[in-house]
Image (spheres, grey):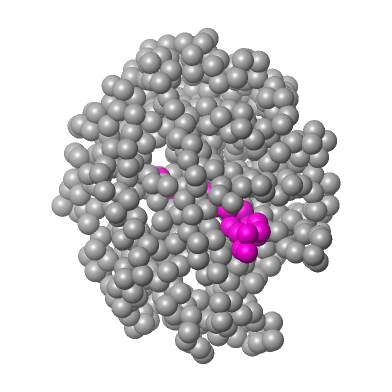
Amino acid sequence: MVAFLPTSEPELNRKSSCVISGFQFSRKLSGQETETKSNEKEAVVTSENGVVASDHETCSEIGADVLGRLGGTAVDAAVAVAFCLGVMNPSSSGIGGGSLMVVSSSSASVATAYDMRETAPLAASQDMFENREEDRVVGPLSIAVPGEIAGLYKAWETHGRVQWKLLVEPSIKLAREGFEVGSHLAFALSKNEDMIKNDPGLKSVFTNGDELSKKGDICYNLKLAETLEAVAERGMKAFYEEDVAEKLVNDVLEAGGIMTMEDLKIYEVKVTDAMVIDDVMGYKIQGMWPPACGTTGFAMVMNVLDRYTKEKDTDENLGLHRVIEVMKHMVAARMDLADPAYVNGISNVVDNLLSKSYAERIHNKISDHTTFPPEYYLNRYNQLEDQGTTHFCVVDKDRNAVSMTTTINYAFGSGFMSPSTGVILNGQMEDFSIPSLKSSNSLPPAPANYIAPKKRALSSMMPLIITKDNELVGVLGASGGPYIFPAMIQVFLNHFVFKMSPLEAVQSPRVYPKLKPNKVLYEDMTVYNGDHIKLKQETRQFLKTRGHELVVTSVGGIVQLIVQSRVDDSKTVLTAVSDLRKDGKPAASDASLV
């Protein structure tokens, strides 16, 4: 029995357990009370040729069509999916935001990382929100310089095969001819009704008179269609140097923002080798460097948990307690990370967090009998609470892969749609730490994450490529801001360590530890298709005996997962799963439902 995570079925046949790196692991993750009222097979597809897993069925199908009918690469499909998600789920992402992308080529040993995150405008300063903290969350001052189109175009120039214009055209058609409001967009609209009705651009697209659009309604964004046409014809130059840029800047400045033409013209995508961690529970993971904190945190947690693997017959609920405790230590430690172009010593911070001595020190601090107050975890700084996002994964017939997380931060970003372009601008300045945000009831802000011109803020986003023995075995990522990290930890353990099926690994209930306040959120939710996900009572009761304060959450991380399984020496099969928590659906290039 695994020593650090619980199983919901203690009576499981032990013959179905697996041995990894010499240690025995159980097949299940956590106690669950999951009621299934619908066909969960809608959330999983298999194919030998290519698959896409995203937050929206239409966008997954568009990506699969690029892979199949157009013979495109994983990056070609990713470009098409990203543009589509910006139209279909505009509360979460879009060309007015930024992204992180990891691209794995079947012919290269190291993946490529594309950091297309938003940057602070040249006129930004660390004290710009003093006495006006609310302006960092919504409104024109919350807008950072968008990077998504620049990053997509750079990746396509290197890895693309299909004509750029063809990849944008499906989204142009959706914006012009109408797109149906889905479950998630309808929910986001209902939760942000005042914002929608107070912004002329948003109101013009998402209301009919004074009535908010509902699920099933058809919306049109004609200005966005015009913008996408310009980008389709002239590439990233249209957005960063030419007419679209001029319109965007004029709208932002007129509304009171500070983004200028110079900001757009000098924007640079950071293209590097991916961050590689060679041994994570027997797998190699490739992801993003700081200021994205996910890859570092992921590896650090696994290093600590690996120290429990020689134990046997450990109580299953105790295992979940241990995972919660390790994640609390990482939640605290990640606030020392930042944009290395602006803060010295970040590489030393990363090396320390990934060292064996650090893992041993954290392991020794964990008690099997109790949790601790926040200060025990060396929680020095106020926590980042980045929001929103969407994630998708793509693998093509040649086994090239893309893992991409994209965001505009809070729902509908800054709450400002550029009226002349139809672009919803991000609210990413909120992700920086603000010196003036200090109070007796909270920890101080993290200086490493203060605002500076052209700086990228700390991010929870964590797109990953997973290999074993030099072969692709998984593509993994999630959306949901602070929920991303714990969601991905638990899904990775579920499938790659405990050998749960990909669908079961994603749909199992999860926990989300917090430090300030010191609580553990546990899922008790009915997802869009009617299924109910809930941590079982026995597990909840055990955690309470260890001092955890449990709080129900009806929201959580949204995970997308693609797994490659070897059938024989000459054949592999891809399985793609989309998280039902956001009503996502995957698609296959040969449309093979299982």
Q: In the rendered structure, does residue 579 fall within the stretch colored magenta?
A: no
User: Can you tell which quarter of the image residue 46 is in?
Assistant: bottom right
Q: Nearer the viewer, residue 476 or 524?
A: 476
User: Can you say whether 237 is above or below 137 in the image?
Assistant: above
Name the residue located 24 percent from the left edge and 63 percent from the top edge: 378
Q: Is residue 257 left or right of residue 241?
A: left
Q: Is residue 299 visible?
A: yes
Q: Is residue 360 left or right of residue 418?
A: left
Q: Is residue 482 visible?
A: no
Q: Is residue 245 left or right of residue 37?
A: left
User: Can you tell which quarter of the image residue 235 is in?
Assistant: top right
Residue 33: % across, % down: 60, 72
Q: Is residue 483 left or right of residue 515?
A: right
Quadrant (top left, top right, bottom left, bottom right) of the C terminus: bottom right
Residue 92: % across, % down: 53, 38
Highlighted range, magenta: 459-482
Residue 198: % across, % down: 45, 24
Q: Nearer the viewer, residue 188 or 10?
A: 10
User: Can you tell which quarter of the image residue 357 is in?
Assistant: bottom left
Q: In the rendered structure, does residue 476 fall within the stretch colored magenta?
A: yes
Quadrant (top left, top right, bottom left, bottom right) of the N terminus: bottom right
